[in-house]
Image (cartoon, grey):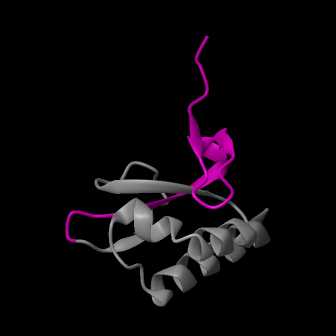
């Protein structure tokens, strides 16, 4: 029996199955973006598939803490657009 892998959302702080969340990754070159495969090399952080959690993560500086750097507004916009796209697909 395989156990589900859980991750904590950097926005709301709730624990969910990682398959239901979005992984944001900082690659070895320092670029931050959405990791659609969930297996990209680099430091990752997880967020729920909703814009409210992204807003909370930005407000609480969760992305900045997770990646130990200032995350640009462009990156936040990219993640927000990805969330909207995924929600429209479902």
Residue 1 picture quarter: top right
Q: Is residue 60 left or right of residue 69?
A: right
Specify start and end residues of the magenta stretch as a single range.
Answer: 1-29
Judge whether residue 7 is colored magenta. yes
Residue located 69% across and 57% down the image:
12
Farthest residue in the front direction? Answer: 60
Q: Position of residue 82 (x, y in %)?
A: 60, 74
Q: Position of residue 51 (x, y in %)?
A: 71, 72
Placement of 57 over or under 5, stated as above or below: below
Q: Position of residue 39 (x, y in %)?
A: 39, 48
Quarter of the image containing the C terminus? Answer: bottom right
Residue located 61% across and 44% down the image:
19
Q: Is residue 48 left or right of residue 78?
A: right
Judge whether residue 24 is colored magenta. yes
Query: Quick one: 16 or 19, which is closer to the camera?
Result: 16
Farthest residue in the top direction? Answer: 1
Q: Is residue 61 left or right of residue 51?
A: left
Q: Position of residue 41 (x, y in %)?
A: 29, 53
Residue located 59% across and 68% down the image:
57
Query: Quick one: 38 or 54, which is closer to the camera?
Result: 54
Placement of 85 over or under 38, stated as above or below: below
Is residue 25 visible to us here? Answer: no
Is residue 27 visible to us here? Answer: yes
């Amino acid at each position: 029996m395989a156990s589900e892998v859980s991750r904590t959302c950097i926005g709301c702080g709730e624990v969910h199955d990682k398959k239901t969340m979005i992984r944001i990754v900082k690659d070895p070159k320092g670029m931050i973006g959405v990791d659609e495969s969930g297996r990209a090399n680099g430091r990752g952080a997880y967020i729920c598939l909703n814009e409210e959690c992204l807003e909370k993560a930005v407000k609480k500086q969760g992305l900045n803490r997770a990646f130990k750097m200032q995350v640009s507004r462009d990156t936040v916009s990219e993640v927000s657009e990805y969330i909207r796209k995924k929600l429209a697909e479902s």
